[in-house]
């Protein structure tokens, strides 16, 4: 790498967004879908268990639910439950449209693009591209790392490390927007700054109750 190329790399900045609960409220669809699966075992998913599922892969989420319900299944049944959950979830997101974007998201994306900040997605969802397409914001993202592209789910940093690589931005110059503790730990593991969205979170650099409250100048100053 030449000195000029290294200087350019040093100057690049990136925003990497989680999907569920940050860009749109698909978290409620995940909860409803998982609860329908849990109904087969007469098991109710508690709010604390549901919180622990945020940012976690479909496979790991089901493992958590079965463990909490003290249920053991065959590998065949396990795979069947995964497929069924995804079918239920897809039915629920089928009617999503740009109106389902959370307040403030589109403005933040426009501002970032205007300022030359690279934009990526780092999500555990295997349906991330479909959701972004329905929200009509897919073109904002230079790289989309989803559940089909990683071996390890959050809190492992793999999804964000691949995001930075896809954007050609150094890890320490990436700012991650997350609403889950698992996601925050993943971002920290990747040596990235964290903007937490929501309450009852910790180990972040800045926290807002929603993207709509986000202050662009304060956020971008995290990597200066």
Image (tube, helix red, strand yellow):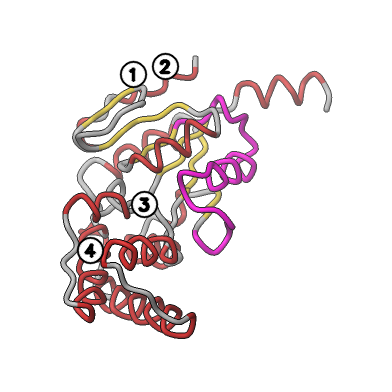
Discs 2, 1 touching: Cβ within 8 Å: yes
Q: Which residue is mark 1?
A: 218
Q: Which residue is mark 4?
A: 31
Lower sequence index among marks 4 and 3: 3
**Structural distance between the alpha carbons of marks 4 and 3:** 15 Å
Name the residue furthest right.
2
Residue 75 located left or right of residue 84: right
- Alpha-carbon neighbours of circle 3 within 10 Å: few (<14), some, or many (≥20)? many
Task: For marks 4 and 2, give the one nearer the viewer.
Answer: 4
- Alpha-carbon neighbours of circle 1 within 10 Å: few (<14), some, or many (≥20)? few
Q: Disc 4 on helix, strand or loop?
A: helix
**Residue beneath the point at 70% across and 19% down:** 7
**Structural distance between the alpha carbons of marks 3 and 2:** 23 Å
Task: For marks 1 and 3, give the one nearer the viewer.
Answer: 3
Lower sequence index among marks 4 and 1: 4
**Residue beneath the point at 30% across and 73% down:** 89
Image location (x, y in percent) of residue 48: 20, 49
Q: Which residue is mark 2?
A: 221
**Residue beneath the point at 25% across and 50% down:** 51
Image location (x, y in percent) of residue 67: 34, 63
Lower sequence index among marks 1 and 3: 3
**Structural distance between the alpha carbons of marks 2 and 1:** 5 Å
The numbered disc on residue 173 is: none
Up-down relation of residue 127 to residue 56 (above or below): below
- Alpha-carbon neighbours of circle 2 within 10 Å: few (<14), some, or many (≥20)? few
Question: Within the magenta stretch, is there residue 23?
Answer: no
Q: Which residue is mark 3?
A: 19
Q: Which residues are magenta?
A: 147-175
**Structural distance between the alpha carbons of marks 1 and 3:** 22 Å
């Amino acid at each position: 790498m030449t000195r000029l190329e290294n200087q350019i790399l040093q100057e690049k900045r990136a925003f990497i967004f989680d999907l569920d609960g940050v860009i749109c409220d698909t978290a409620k669809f995940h909860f409803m879908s998982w609860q329908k699966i849990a109904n087969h075992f007469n098991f109710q998913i508690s709010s604390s268990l549901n919180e622990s599922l945020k940012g976690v892969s479909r496979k790991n989420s089901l493992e958590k639910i079965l463990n909490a319900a003290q249920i053991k299944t065959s590998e065949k049944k396990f795979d069947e439950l995964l497929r069924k959950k995804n079918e239920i979830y897809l039915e629920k997101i089928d009617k999503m449209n740009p109106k389902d974007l959370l307040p403030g998201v589109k403005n933040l994306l426009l501002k970032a693009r205007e300022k030359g900040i690279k934009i990526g997605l780092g999500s555990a969802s295997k349906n991330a591209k479909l959701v972004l397409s329905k929200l009509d914001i897919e073109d904002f993202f230079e790289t989309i790392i989803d559940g089909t592209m990683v071996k390890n789910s959050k809190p492992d940093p793999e999804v964000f490390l691949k995001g930075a690589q896809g954007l050609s931005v150094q890890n320490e110059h990436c700012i991650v927007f997350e609403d889950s503790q698992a996601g925050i730990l993943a971002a920290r593991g990747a040596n990235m700054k964290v903007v937490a969205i929501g309450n009852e979170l910790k180990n972040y650099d800045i926290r807002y109750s929603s993207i709509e409250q986000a202050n662009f100048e304060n956020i971008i100053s995290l990597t200066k």
